[in-house]
């Protein structure tokens, strides 16, 4: 990285730090701030309804409330309704003949960032039950969604980064994207399309109340717009179809690949943050830098023998590109952590999210260590170590997995 590029990057970072100086932390998922009755409250009379107040505006078709008695059996309720004039409040009527005992209310909503959120409230009517069974409702298992996101978006990011790097590497006499993958290109395209389609249905099944597939078929924009993740999947599928159009100029495919990579930044926690534009900008830069970093490593792994044959111009270009991508990835990751979390609360209450953060940081550190040793070997002995390249790619893929898992969980604070 030359001095001019370093100065520009430092100025951008300083600008972002100044902007973030006045940013307060907000919840990345919809959170319950008030309820009637209160959690654990003992009521002497039937309140007539359950009321919940959230930190965000809700969509009526994506709200679901279930009530269970002390035996874990469900009590039938009417459809919940939003409070007129304040869509962050939702209420549901209670049956007038509700028996005395302890009840568990479970309210499921979709937050502004498209993530399903579930809140529980326990209250008693007349008297507390001696024994309270777990509700019979089965919670959605996020495992399949996380694995599908990992597989699909890993292929997409590495493939997109590989294409962009291959376009640049052609200037130095190295193989193109088509020459690099050959018959693997249609297979990769098919895997991405199957992955996006499967993600849609798995995600749809995890949401309360309304079906996104039904909303899409009926053209219900208000329901679809409540989920940025669903919009991200639809746009990604459209871009993937455009990517499959044959015979277009190189600029067409470069633009579509760039849009496809950047689109992956719009399906996460950023939508619940303020200012929104800064949160999205950090995510776009983070995702794009990761794609370039891993795409560059994948390209070098495919053409290791050709790259180390005295091609000094490509060597210096590649090292500058990877250094810049690694630096931007690391810095935007730190800035995103600063914007999206309350660091004090994060340290006070240790969660699985914190463990994943530590794992991701260790993996990135290992990538940097391996990259530094690879750089020294390439510059000194003019030799690329294939084993180190493979490990660097593996560490990067695992870091993506940790990051995607974190994105499916509420941020601390």
Image: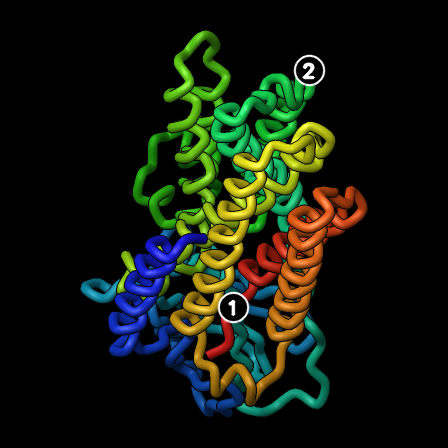
Residue 110: which disc? none
Residue that protrudes farthest toward the left in the picture: 85
**SS category of the residue bearing label 2:** loop
Query: Which color scheme is applied?
Result: rainbow
Q: Position of residue 379 (x, y in %)?
A: 65, 48
Residue 164 drawn at (x, y percent) = 49, 32
Question: From this viewpoint, which residue is outermost toward the right?
Answer: 387
For the residue pair 182 and 144, the one nearer the viewer reads as 182
Instruction: Identify the residue under disc 2.
Output: 183
Q: Quadrant of residue 304?
A: top right
Q: Is residue 348 above or below residue 315?
A: below
Q: Earlier in the sequence, mark 2 or mark 1?
A: 2
Q: Nearer the viewer, mark 2 or mark 1?
A: 2
Q: Residue at x 57, y 50 (%)?
A: 206
Q: Quadrant of residue 298?
A: top right
- Please tell me which residue is depicted at 48% across the width and 30% down the height of the picture: 168
**Which residue is nearer to you in this view: 10 or 151?**
10
Give left or right: position of 208 versus 380: left
| Figure label count | 2
Which residue: 37% across, 57% down? 3
In this picture, is 166 found above or below 381?
A: above
Question: What residue is shown with label 1?
Answer: 410
Tell me where residue 66 appears, x and y as whole percent. Answer: 53, 64
Q: Is residue 355 visible?
A: yes
For the residue pair 92 and 305, the one nearer the viewer reads as 305
Tell me if I can see residue 112 in this picture: no
Viewed as shown, does residue 150 lie left or right of 58? Answer: right
């Amino acid at each position: 990285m030359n001095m001019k590029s370093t100065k520009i990057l430092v100025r951008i970072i300083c600008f972002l730090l100044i902007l973030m100086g006045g940013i307060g932390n907000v919840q990345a998922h919809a959170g319950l701030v008030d309820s009637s009755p209160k959690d654990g409250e003992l009521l002497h009379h039937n309140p007539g309804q359950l009321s919940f107040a959230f930190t965000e505006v809700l969509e009526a078709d994506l709200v679901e409330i279930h009530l269970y008695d002390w035996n874990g059996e469900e009590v039938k309720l009417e459809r919940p309704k939003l409070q007129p004039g304040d869509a962050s409040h939702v209420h549901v009527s209670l049956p007038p003949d509700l028996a005395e005992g302890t009840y568990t209310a479970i309210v499921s909503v979709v937050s502004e960032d498209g993530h399903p959120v579930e809140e529980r409230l326990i209250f008693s009517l007349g008297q507390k039950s001696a024994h309270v069974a777990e509700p019979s409702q089965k919670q959605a298992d996020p495992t399949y969604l996380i694995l599908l996101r990992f597989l699909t978006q890993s292929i997409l990011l590495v493939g997109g980064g590989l294409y962009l790097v291959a376009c640049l590497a052609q200037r130095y006499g190295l193989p193109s994207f088509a020459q690099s993958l050959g018959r693997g290109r249609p297979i990769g395209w098919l895997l991405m399309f199957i992955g996006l389609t499967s993600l849609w249905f798995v995600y749809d099944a995890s949401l309360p109340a309304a079906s996104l597939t039904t909303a899409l078929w009926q053209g219900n924009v208000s329901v679809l717009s409540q989920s940025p993740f669903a919009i991200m999947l639809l746009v990604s599928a459209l871009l993937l179809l455009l990517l499959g159009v044959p015979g277009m100029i190189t600029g067409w495919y470069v633009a579509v690949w760039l849009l496809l990579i950047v689109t992956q930044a719009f399906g996460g926690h950023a939508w619940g943050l303020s200012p929104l534009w800064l949160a999205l900008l950090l995510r776009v830069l983070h995702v794009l830098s990761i794609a370039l970093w891993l795409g560059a490593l994948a390209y070098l792994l495919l053409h290791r023998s050709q790259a180390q044959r005295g091609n000094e111009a490509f060597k210096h270009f590649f090292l500058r590109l990877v250094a810049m991508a690694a630096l931007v990835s690391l810095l935007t990751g730190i800035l995103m952590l600063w914007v999206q979390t309350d660091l004090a609360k994060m340290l006070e209450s240790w969660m699985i999210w914190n463990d994943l953060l530590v794992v991701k940081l260790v993996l990135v550190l290992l990538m940097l260590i391996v990259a530094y040793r690879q750089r020294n070997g390439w510059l000194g002995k003019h030799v690329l170590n294939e084993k180190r390249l493979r490990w660097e790619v593996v560490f990067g893929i695992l870091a993506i997995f940790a990051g995607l898992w974190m994105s499916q969980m509420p941020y601390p604070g």
